[in-house]
Image (spheres, grey):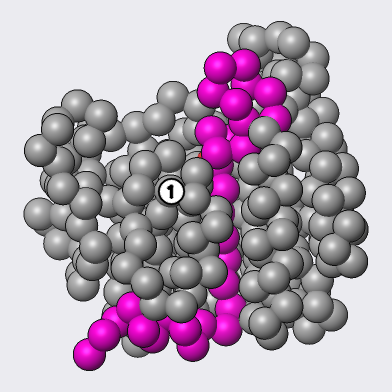
Amino acid sequence: MNFREKLKDKKRIVVKIGSSSLTHPETGNMNYSKIEQLIRTLTDIHGTGRDVVLVSSGAIAVGRQVMNIKPQTLSEKQALAAIGQARLMMTYQKLFAEYNQVTGQILMTKNTMVNALNRRLAQNTFEELLHLGVIPIVNENDTVSTYEIEFGDNDRLSAIVAALIHADLLILLSDIDGFYTDDPHKNPDARLISLVPEINEDFLNMGKGTSTDIGTGGMSAKLSAARVATDSGADMVIMNGDRLDAIPQVLKGEEIGTLFLAHKNKNFDLIDYLSD
Ligand code: GLU
């Protein structure tokens, strides 16, 4: 069976973009042409009748640029997140509006997910927004999350969102082309893996020690996200955020990036994945 072909049938897609894909590496300024391309692509995917959710990082990165300071303390970081999140949403809303696409903001905390009532309410809100044809834009509520209670990174957050709303595909936009046998920045012999049927020890070992410096999620964070997503019943694709034009090709079944296959655990309970 061609697993890639099955991506054509995906109906509910969560797309995660990180700070490093939204900003210019030289300056940290927002990369507007990339953001614009992302928005056009997501609106078009939505236009094909699919539900689309965007999980976007960048609150702190954008806040830093706006205020031109490097945060030293947690409260400084949280203040920058408040400033940057608003700026980020303003930019998203303005650009989505050009294509008549309505968006909504959902800021989540780990507490929201751990509490059964809050979790259900969050799920209902997502359902309602999707029913209304809205593209929800999600981030962690960094202004109130602390290190002890945070999700940690948006790779995990996006997988938790995918599980919560029963998405059938999660796309992680990364700063490399996919999942490699080793860190391609350090090892020229590292090979891109096109298909991960199941996340076993070998794959976990390959994911160790790769990271990016702007965002928080290295490959091991992506593997941990893959575990949540695939156990919940969603396929997951890691692909390069520099090739946003390739997202529709992935949805046509083309072999781009790395595909992690869903293998729904019938006893899947999101709460089990929130504690580690
Ligand atoms: N929530 C953080 C922010 O928006 C990003 C976390 C992450 O990049 O994984 O700045």
Please tell me which residue is depicted at 65% across the width and 13% down the height of the picture: 71
Q: Amino acid at mark 1?
A: Asn
Instruction: Determine which residue is flagged by label 1.
Output: 240
Q: x, y (%) of residue 100?
A: 89, 66
Residue 4 falls in image quadrant:
bottom left
Q: Position of residue 259 (x, y in %)?
A: 32, 67
Can residue 17 be found in the magenta stretch? Answer: yes
- Front in this rendered view, residue 107 or 3: 3
Classify mark 1: residues with Cα within 10 Å, few (<14), some (14-19) or many (20+).
many
**In this rendering, position of residue 25 left or right of residue 32:** left
Q: Is residue 160 visible?
A: no
Query: Which span is picked out in magenta?
Result: 1-30
Tell me where residue 1 sits by quadrant: bottom left
Q: Is mark 1 within 8 Å of ligand 1?
A: no
> For this view, does 178 lie left or right of residue 36?
left
Q: At x 16% / y 48%, what residue is drawn?
A: 191
Task: Identify whether 184 is placed above or below 234.
Answer: above
Task: Tell me which residue sits at (37%, 72%) in the image.
Answer: 254
When asked about the image quadrant of residue 273, the answer is bottom left
Q: From the top left corner, tell me how far across and down residue 163 is, in percent.
A: 51, 71
Q: Is residue 21 visible?
A: yes
* Left or right relative to 155: residue 264: left
Indicate the secondary structure of the residue bearing disc 1: strand
The structure residue drawn at horizontal position 27% and vertical position 51%, both measured from the top left corner, is 179
Q: Nearer the viewer, residue 164 or 116?
A: 164
The number of discs equals 1
